[in-house]
Image (spheres, rainbow, N blue to C red):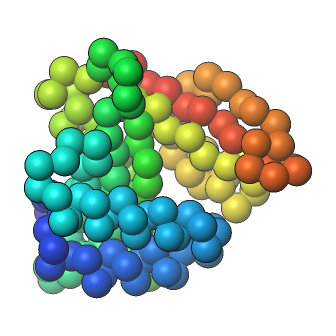
Amino acid sequence: MNIRKTTGADREALLKFIKASENLTGEEKDCAVELLDIYLKDAGQTDYSFITALGPEGSQAGYACYGKRPLTLATYDLYWILVDPDRRRSGIGRLLLKEVEGLLRDGGAKIIVAETSGLPAYEAARRLYMESGYSEEARIRDFYKPGDDVLFYTKRL
């Protein structure tokens, strides 16, 4: 598995991953596309970074989006990890998470924050964070909508 910075050549494949995501709402999918386009269209922007995982045959297998949390010294947000639906549960998300952590650590980051839904559909994401050394720092009940909490996971790098 090769992981590298996302390029414009990745856009169509990543759009397919976003569209195919069963967990993301329409609004979340729109946001994911917007962040990708900001990253690809403005090389000088520093709000969002993207990396793409490539399978052995060279095709896009997944991606991660992350960026520095505004008004902090060295805290970063993990915005998305999305994997090709045909390759889920194969360790690609874990590899992308480890790569993001390494890049951030090497860049001087101290804390990474990942937020996710409390719905059962997001159990795999929550398990990934916990198994990767993250701590559940906070839960805001009914954050997204009634019955859908937001959970904040953090890891000190």
139 relative to 31, above or below? above
Report whether 87 appears left or right of 44.
Answer: right
Quarter of the image where the N terminus is located: bottom left
Which residue is outermost to the right? Answer: 146
Quadrant where the C terminus lies?
A: top left
Q: Is residue 21 above or below residue 142?
A: below
Q: Is residue 43 left or right of residue 52?
A: left
Query: Residue 150: image x %, image y %?
Result: 69, 41
In the depicted view, which residue is nearer to us: 100 or 75?
75
Where residue 151 sits in the image (x, y, percent)? Answer: 66, 37
Give the residue at x 87% y 50%: 147
Q: Looking at the picture, how far across and down is residue 102, in whole percent?
A: 21, 35
Residue 37, placed above or below residue 93: below
**Do we see residue 110 in this rendering?**
no
Classify residue 115 by image quadrant: top right
36 or 126: nearer the viewer? 36
**Residue 66: x and y, percent?**
34, 45
Q: What residue is rendered at 67% in x and 49% in y?
A: 117
